[in-house]
Image (cartoon, helix red, strand yellow):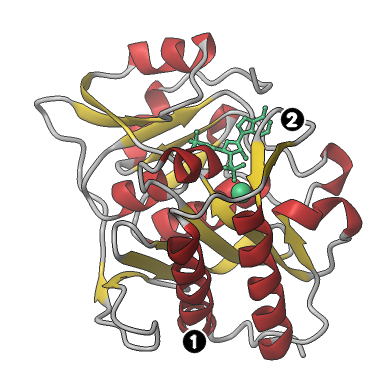
Amino acid sequence: MLPDASHPDEIALRLAPIAVEAAQLLRSMENALIERRIKDDGSPTTAADLAAERLILRRLDEAWPGVPVVAEETASTTHTDEFFFLVDPLDGTRDFIHGTGEYSVNIALIRGNRPLAAAVAAPAMGSVWIAGTTARRSTMLGEGSHFDWHDIKVRSAPAEGLVALVSRRHGDVATEACLSILSIGTRRMTSSALKFCLIASGEADVYVRCGATMEWDTAAGDHILCCAGGSVVGPGSVPLTYGHEDRGYRNGPFAALGDASLSSKLDLPTAAA
Ligand SMILES: Nc1ncnc2c1ncn2[C@@H]1O[C@H](COP(=O)(O)O)[C@@H](OP(=O)(O)O)[C@H]1O
Ligand SMILES: [Mg+2]
């Protein structure tokens, strides 16, 4: 059954309990001694990533049977259609393993090559963000079917200096060069798609990433930030597009901005570091 593209906010409301259920499963596995292995790209995966992915695939199939899902752990077997989901069942696996609590569940519905609806749940922060046409945030209450949604909005670039969010574990020279051009007042290390959501919530201003990321790392956060009034752009200030099976669902360099006027100052390289 195809999603009803004329009601993106209703789709987002249906994605929220799925993301929260997976987030609660991950939370329950946090302190267990779980099996892990290193993938071909050098990043780890665990039994928790797989369990959360299985749960999300089942729930998406119950809600929208037959819509393809490009999910991190099974991406190589999936082909996209006009509508497809991009799913990262555990974004920030290293932080999950190290117990920082900075990890998230990311689900985005793509139509064509851009997101239509999205949800990001961050269990250790007790927050869930969604976006259809507007962006909203709720605390994660009880079993995941109760929410206290409120609209969120980006802030204007503060005169006293920008708050930049940087990956806790992945930095590179090209990202540093881009950041050095902006008037950064404070840097905060944050993992996973939380970086997009904190900018969308008006708590930070910029996230530049020139190193490797995958489409499921960014699609949901991209949509939430754009619906909150921000922007996510690649080289030439062009929005990111999704569904690039030909390049293994890899993103190029990008910047996530609360205040879109910052994009004129950016100088992103054309290829990921
Ligand atoms: N060499 C690489 N190739 C592809 N993606 C990479 C990568 N190194 C890191 N990443 C991506 O960066 C994400 C973590 O970002 P951050 O450091 O900002 O939390 C990882 O998400 P996962 O934990 O879902 O694998 C992974 O997808
Ligand atoms: Mg993951």
Residue drawn where x is 64% and y is 29% of the image: 212
Q: Amino acid at mark 2?
A: Asp
Q: Quadrant of the N terminus?
A: bottom right
Residue drawn where x is 56% and y is 48% of the image: 218
Mark 2 CB within 8 Å of ligand 1: yes
Residue labelled with disc 1? 10
Residue drawn where x is 14% and y is 34% of the image: 158
Position of residue 239 relative to residue 85, above or below, is above
Picture coordinates of residue 250 (x, y %)? Answer: 72, 38
Disc 2 packing (10 Å; few <14; some 14–19; many ≥20): few
Q: Amino acid at mark 1?
A: Glu
Q: Nearer the viewer, residue 233 or 151?
A: 151
Give the mark nearer the N terminus: 1 vs 2.
Answer: 1
Residue labelled with disc 2? 41
Q: Is residue 119 toward the left or the right of residue 183 in the image?
A: right
Q: Quadrant of ligand 1?
A: top right
Residue at mark 1 to residue at mark 2: CA–CA distance: 36 Å
Q: Nearer the viewer, residue 101 or 191?
A: 101
Q: Is residue 38 toward the left or the right of residue 165 in the image?
A: right
